[in-house]
Image (cartoon, rainbow, N blue to C red):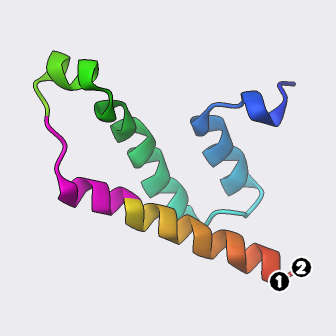
Amino acid sequence: MKAVDQWTLSELIAVSRALGVLSEDVARHADQVRNFRNYIHPRQQLRENFEPRMETARIAQQVLRGALVDLNHIATSS
């Protein structure tokens, strides 16, 4: 088994969901944000002729906030 600091984001999301750390809705949205994050790289943007907008960055920010709420809930209910 790999050390946690060697896990991919996909693995972190899946394990967090399986352990009940992330709610189903946050995990699903996090997985979509994970797919979307590659567009942050300029080379990927050029290759796919894509320019991310502030609105889509805000969506990712909301998913992060949802994950933080889930983590806080787990931390305070223990």
Contact between marks 1 and 2 (CB within 8 A): the answer is yes
Image x and y of residue 26, in percent: 51, 63
Is 78 covered by the magenta stretch? no
Q: Quadrant of the N terminus?
A: top right
Q: Residue furthest bottom?
A: 77
Residue occupying image coordinates x 14% and y 37%:
51
Residue occupying image coordinates x 20% and y 56%:
54
Instruction: Find residue 52 and report its image quarter.
Output: top left
Calculate the distance from the C-alpha at mark 1 to the C-alpha at mark 2: 4 Å
For the record, the magenta segment spans 51-60
Image x and y of residue 69, in percent: 60, 76
Image x and y of residue 18, in percent: 72, 53
Q: Secondary structure at mark 2?
A: loop
Image x and y of residue 44, in percent: 26, 21
Q: Quadrant of the C terminus?
A: bottom right
Residue type at tag 1 = Ser
Q: Which residue is mark 2?
A: 78
Q: Residues within 10 Å of mark 1 (few under 14, many from 20)?
A: few
Q: Which residue is mark 1?
A: 77
Image vertical order of residue 48 relative to residue 65, above or below: above
Residue type at tag 2 = Ser
Q: Residue furthest front?
A: 42
* Residue 76 in the figure: left or right of residue 23: right
Image vertical order of residue 76 relative to residue 70, above or below: below
Residue occupying image coordinates x 31% and y 35%:
40
Q: Residue furthest left?
A: 49
Q: Secondary structure at mark 1?
A: loop
